[in-house]
Image (cartoon, rainbow, N blue to C red):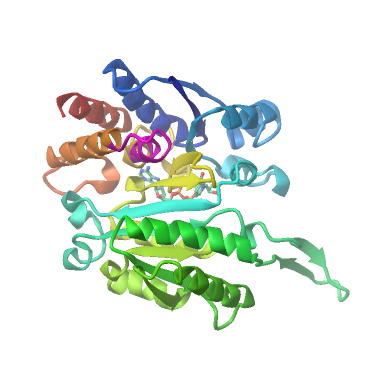
Amino acid sequence: MTQKILLLPGDGIGPEIVAQAEKVLRALVAGGDLALQWSSAPIGGAALDACGSPLPDETLRLARAADAVLLGAVGGPKWDGADRVLRPEKGLLRLRAELGLFANLRPALLYPQLAHASTLLPEVIAGLDLLFVRELTGGIYFGEPRGIRRRDDGEREGYNTLVYRESEIRRIARVAFEAARRRQRRVCSVDKANVLEATVLWREVVGEIGGDYPDVALTHMYVDNAAMQLVRAPKQFDVIVTTNMFGDILSDLAAMATGSIGMLPSAALNGSGFGMYEPIHGSAPDIAGQDVANPLATILSVAMLARYSLARDDLARRIEAAIGAVLNAGYRTGDIASPGTTVLGTGAMGDAVVAALADG
Ligand code: NAD
């Protein structure tokens, strides 16, 4: 059966990196490994410019009709002054919410070849392999009421609401425990239960769900300590489950332990296994259009797409191995370069991965 993929290149480096992912899809289809169709649609600032909305109805319709979605990134200074409800990021947040993509899986895996690209000591990060399970459709990014208002004394104040329902905590906790069963069977739940009531409930409910997984060791940690531990001794973690905002911040922090934000893919899944896949980095407007962006996080997102949406773990492993082979051959983009390596542009790195796939 031919499966349908929707590509959402987005803004900044998005189109450049998604073009490299497309080369990989094309190679897999040409090699007879997959029966796949794909199409593209605008999202974010590009959609705002073209259609007046950061998530056009047609893009949402195509996403619903697809078997999986691959996104580049959205946003950029061009749209920073846009009305808050029209900002590019709003398009992405709404798409995640519309598709019910509540579970964000963000692996932080260190390729041994890149141990020296990290600012952390090689012995601290060698062998790092942790998985963030971030709640993606709730918490303070979505809570109401929210806004900027004028107080009675005339001063303006900004306000947001951190709110979690038990059902939202239960379902993300289950994703984390299930993921841990396929790994080292350890879950660390990160919260701020010493200050925030919403995360007092978070801790309680994660603990209840943990009771259904006696084979998985559950620990709890405050987010400030978790930030410190991720820099001090990141290998102590296997699966970290946390709220939307804490996961957003901590996974970027862990990204740097792996050398570059340009290496990390992610999956956002709903309750029936439908997924949207994207690199964890943003649209990098500072390097857009220069053929220097690292496309490997996006190509690794294709590997996650194959694993979770196409049930093709074999292809996922082939893509990951091809990237390993490219790194072994000494090829790097600028963000992960070190002395003695060969720096490639975005397009040449995509070509190198395709060549390694053909060899593998
Ligand atoms: P960013 O991730 O875009 O960039 C941070 C730094 O990392 C920059 O120096 C950038 O050049 C570098 N970088 C990022 N991806 C890279 C890659 N593939 N290769 C090499 N270097 C890379 O974060 P930012 O600068 O804070 O945000 C830029 C824009 O992206 C903003 O508009 C922000 O809202 C948006 N954003 C979007 C998403 C998303 O679409 N999921 C996520 C985060 C930020």
* Front-most of residues 15 and 125: 125
Q: Residue at x 37, y 75 (%)?
A: 228
Q: Is residue 41 left or right of residue 58?
A: left
Residue 228 to residue 257: above or below? below
Quarter assignment of residue 166: bottom right
Q: Is residue 77 left or right of residue 104?
A: right
Residue 289 to residue 358: above or below? below
Residue 85 to residue 225: above or below? above
Residue 306 is a magenta residue = yes
Residue 250 in the image: x percent, y percent? 43, 64
Residue 127 to residue 207: above or below? above
* Front-most of residues 103 and 22: 103
Quarter assignment of residue 89: top right
Q: Residue at x 32, y 67 (%)?
A: 237
Q: Magenta segment, which residues?
A: 300-313
Residue 239 in the image: x percent, y percent? 37, 63
* Front-most of residues 69 and 45: 69
Q: Is residue 119 left or right of residue 200?
A: left
Q: Quadrant of the N terminus?
A: top left
Q: Is residue 130 left or right of residue 211?
A: left
Q: Residue at x 57, y 74 (%)?
A: 199
Which secondary structure type mostly characterizes the magenta part of the structure? Answer: helix
Q: Going by the picture, which residue comes out furthest to the bottom?
A: 194
- Is any atom of residue 248 visible in this view? no
Residue 333 in the image: x percent, y percent? 26, 40
Q: Going by the picture, which residue comes out furthest to the right?
A: 152
Q: Quadrant of the C terminus?
A: top left
Residue 186 in the image: x percent, y percent? 34, 67
Residue 10 is a magenta residue = no
Q: Residue at x 37, y 36 (%)?
A: 311
- Is any atom of residue 313 visible in this view? yes
